[in-house]
Structures are given as C-alpha cells and as structure tokens.
Amino acid sequence: MRRVIKTILFLIVVTMGMTINAQTDFEQNGISIGVVVSDLEASKIFYTEVVGMKEVPGFSVTGDIGKSTGLTGGLPFDVTVLKLEDNPTAAQWKLMSFKKGATHPKQKHIQDDTGMQYITIFPKNIALVIERIKKNNIPTLGETPIQLPDGKTFVLIQDPDGTFVELIGDL
C-alpha cells in the first residue's frame, strides 16, 4: 500500500513538474500590444478617461533602432504605455502615432476587416465605465449594454480609430 501511495505521489509531482515547465517557455506571462493611432491625445483620453486605463512610463525609439529592428523605415517614435493597473505583470497597451502614417477605414462590424479587430476588458464595476461612456458621449454599438446569459453586462464601443472595445462586467 505504501508503495502504491509513493508511486501515486511521484506521478503527481512529475506531472506537476511537466506542467510548470510547459508554462515557463516565456519570460513574461502577458502580451504587450502596440497600436498605431491617428491621434495620440484623443486615443490616450479615450483609454484613460473612458475605459479607465492607467498611464505608466513610456519610452522612445530612435530612428536608427526603428530601422534596424524593422519597425519603421527610420522614423523615430514615442510610445505611450497604458495598463489596466500599475502592476509590473499587467498587459501593456502601447499607443504610438506618426504624423504621416497609414490610415485605416473605420469598421462597422468585426467582420469588415482582417487583423486585430477588438479587445475585451473586464471591469469590476461596469456601471462606472458606462457612466464615463455617457459622460464622454461615446456611442455604444448594437443594443448594448445588454445582459449576457451569465448575468454579466456587455457593452461594445469603438476607440477613435475604430478598434472595438468589449467591456464585460457586473453592474
């Protein structure tokens, strides 16, 4: 009996070790997303004052670094970093703008284009976000806010460049 228990415990420890090792392929557990926007100030206001993100220290990329990394053809740029909370492990929403940048047509629905079309944010109190949406005259899309089958409230809005922002939370 002891041998069976030891074998079971050994298998549990080995299985847990494999799971832990499988989860350590990345240095960080979050994804940082860079978004090129047409109007940096308008986007910053939208994401901080409407959605509720926090601005944290950003950074600059020189023209030489932009070119050598392949990010730009030699244009320098500044990156405004926003997070849902000022926490080192929180995902980064990195905004940048170029004076002569590409324009992107504003979509009416997520099926209107390819690539990243929307983000989903889960506020603890969606009523506060809805108040900020109304205060800033941001139109909600569809028939939102609506109640989902799990009792959460769903709101869909778009940022100044047309990226859809899903907000899901408790009232």
Image: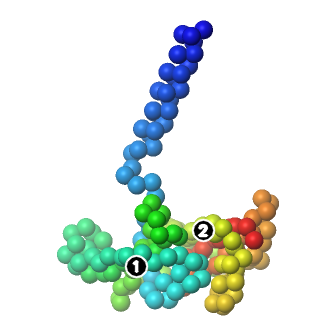
Image position of 51 (left or right of 23): right
Q: Earlier in the sequence, mark 1 or mark 2?
A: 1
Find residue 149 and report its image quarter.
bottom right
Q: Which mark is residue 121?
A: 2
Toward the viewer: 140 or 108? Answer: 140
Residue at x 54%, y 10% (from the top left corner):
3
Whether residue 162 appears in this view of the structure is no
Toward the viewer: 59 or 85? Answer: 85
The image shows residue 2 at horizontal and vertical percentages of: 56, 10
Q: Is residue 151 above or below residue 110?
A: above
Work out how far the residue at label 1 is from the one at label 2, CA to CA, in angstroms: 19 Å
Q: Is residue 163 above or below residue 19?
A: below
Element class at badge 1: strand
Look at label 2 and name its amino acid. Answer: Ile
Element class at badge 2: strand
Toward the viewer: 20 or 73? Answer: 20
Quadrant for the N terminus in the image: top right
Image position of 120 (left or right of 131): left
Toward the viewer: 66 or 82? Answer: 82
Image position of 131 (left or right of 92): right
Find residue 164 and report its image quarter.
bottom right
Residue at x 53%, y 16% (from the top left corner):
6
The image shows residue 132 at horizontal and vertical percentages of: 65, 84
Look at label 1 and name its amino acid. Answer: Thr
Whether residue 60 appears in this view of the structure is yes
Q: Which mark is residue 80?
A: 1
